[in-house]
Amino acid sequence: MPSCLPIKDDDATIRKALEDAHLPSLIAALVHITGDASPIRGDIKPLYDFFGDGQGSLTPEQCERTKTQASAALKAFAAGGSKMPPQPSGDVIRELMDFVAGAKIPEHYVPFLMEELALTSDDAKAGDWGNAIPTAAKKDFRVLVIGAGMSGVLAAIRLKQAGIPFTIVDKNSDVGGTWFENTYPGCRVDNPNHLYSYSFEPNYDWPQHYSTQGKLWAYFRGVADKYGIRELVKFDTEVIESVYDEARSLWTSRLRHKDGREEKIETNAIITAVGQLNRPKMPDVKGIESFKGASFHSGNWNHSVDLKGKRVAVIGTGASAFQFVPEIAPEVGRMFVFQRSAPWLGPAPDYHHDVEEGQKWLLKHVPFYAQWYRFWMFWMLTDGIYAAVQADPTWTTRLDSVSAANDFLRDVLTQYIQSQSGGDEAFFKKVVPTYPPGGKRTVRDNGVWLAALRRPNVELIVDPIAEITPRGVKTKDGKEYEVDVIIYGTGFHASRFLSPMTFKGRGGVDLHRQWDGDARAYLGITIPNFPNLFCMYGPNTNIVVNGSIIFFSECEIRYIMGCIETLLENGYVAMEPKRDIHDAFNEKIDAGNKQMAWGVPQVSSWYKNAKGRVAQNWPFPLVEYWARTRAPDPKDFEFRKAARS
Ligand code: NAP
């Protein structure tokens, strides 16, 4: 059950904290505390507005009135001993959902959102993890978890809770995955932190609304320690190859440790949790080896290179460069930013803001405030903007939008960019994207990006790069930019799923040969010919505008645990998806992606593989992934029992 710290503060402290409240969430919490639903049935009706003030456009008088009421209610609550109030009726909770969301929530979202809201449980996505399965059966089933980033730690937590033995390995020397590896200046999460956390491990002490890499890493490390996972991880250990033995229904994996020592382990199942974005991609540009100065990729930032006063070339203007360019621009001597496509900027005024002390106090002390606040963020980012990135097949008006709603969004975002261009038309033309909003990841912006590009020591180059020379970067117009350092913000080999590992499934089928550069899985998790191989953050489980990857990982691990339970409960030793189910699913995914801004032909991005297919993204509302992964449907799988000896 959710709980709160008792309120022992004086009236002034309470009143001060209320200044930092998210008011729609506060009003919902007041309904819990007082049992009186009248505040949501009066004149206050928060509005859903993605780019709005975050307070549902309440009037100043409504804001003041709410804080006064809250102050009195919290005083009475504290006087009564800060006892957690009983839950309102289901009807009132349903009313509260629409109220806080500022929108009429469709009925089919309600069970999904109720789970996210988690009013009655600290871990609403935890199952019973197969309590009915005899311990002995569990003890005989071993799992290899590959990766100890956000998904791998989560998998290990769930396996441990279920009493299923596992080995967890990571190529790095600590947990954290992307938050361990990416140490470039300015690296931070671009999803609000109170949402970008495990649902069962909220952190009411996030220092910023979008915290920096070190804080993210500390969070995942802290959770891994709390659940006793970090001590179990074999660090500096890579999986080289995993081979399935059909006769024994076992995977044999060859692990290589940092010192070159190899080890083989046998497991009944494998969970891959290796992320999509951790193999840095250098651009395919002539002369790249010839450069005489220092050069490195953003994913392998070389902190020993002193950039102070140096001439620096930055190649790429994606989400990583967007974060490090404003950080290093003031210290470098001169900077040339080479842009192939401009990013769309989504306004996030609090992008670099500290979480207000009052907000932290409310999250910790006010019953159900934290739950409603997270619910509000979840709804804002769930499917709020989803409709605006869906392509209308009849839309032919222009190529930089895909529907009337998308065109409206393009207009709003274009005005936002124009407002920061200082009246410089030539600059504005360079920095306004020429592809539809949602075609690539929209970066969360508070103005620092364009301000950095407009600095006197920074030049934005849009002429295509012809080659890298020993002295710097030469563009197609023949101009050479001499620099001391080149920083590649050129992204990752995202579509090479599970590379460079080798997986040999039933009949010795090689996974990469089966995929042939076009990775596919059923629900992004299971693959025909590869029994008991389960992927987390696998093909088509990335998201562009809605939700957080943690949400997907939590859905995936619940499904995977359901698969393991199904095996053990029924005495099966292996399962793999039926080919026709897998193929039909992927056809549906492909049709869905073609109707999204990132799937239209005029957009190219890391979401598309070399064959032009969107192999990364989930094209549907989150509720569909949630519904489909709550439990495996046995009809989707081929199961095998152990061969009799
Ligand atoms: P990216 O989004 O793939 O950006 C790569 C950039 O390099 C793009 O601007 C690309 O241009 C450019 N580029 C690539 N090859 C080039 C070439 N040969 N010549 C010139 N330019 C070239 O990579 P990223 O910035 O590392 O981000 C990858 C993903 O990681 C993001 O989409 C996001 O999902 C995630 N990420 C998240 C965060 C966060 O949460 N805070 C931060 C960083 C990254 P084109 O666009 O024209 O291809």
Image: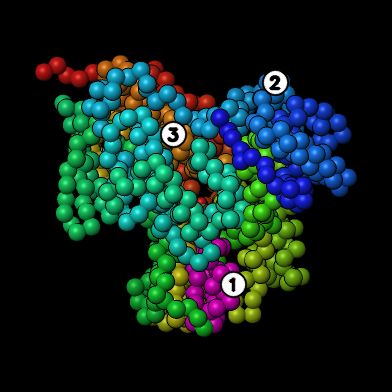
| Residue type indicated by callout 1 | Leu
**Rendered view: 311 above or below 149:** below
> Residue 558 location, x and y as percent?
43, 30
Q: Residues within 10 Å of mark 2 (few under 14, many from 20)?
A: few
Q: Residue at x 16, y 26 (%)?
A: 247
Looking at this view, name the residue that lies furthest to the left: 645
| Residue type indicated by callout 3 | Glu
Give the residue pinned by disc 1. Answer: 460
Distance from disc 3 to disc 1, alpha carbons, whole Å, reads 41 Å
Give the residue pinned by disc 3. Answer: 556
Mark 3 or mark 1: whose residue is earlier in sequence: 1
Secondary structure, mark 1, is strand
Mark 2 or mark 3: whose residue is earlier in sequence: 2
Give the residue pinned by disc 2. Answer: 89
Q: Residues within 10 Å of mark 1 (few under 14, many from 20)?
A: some
Q: Residue at x 40, y 58 (%)?
A: 181
- In this picture, residue 288 sits left or right of residue 338: left
> Residue 232 location, x and y as percent?
30, 45
Is the Cβ of the residue at disc 3 closer than 8 Å to that at disc 1?
Answer: no
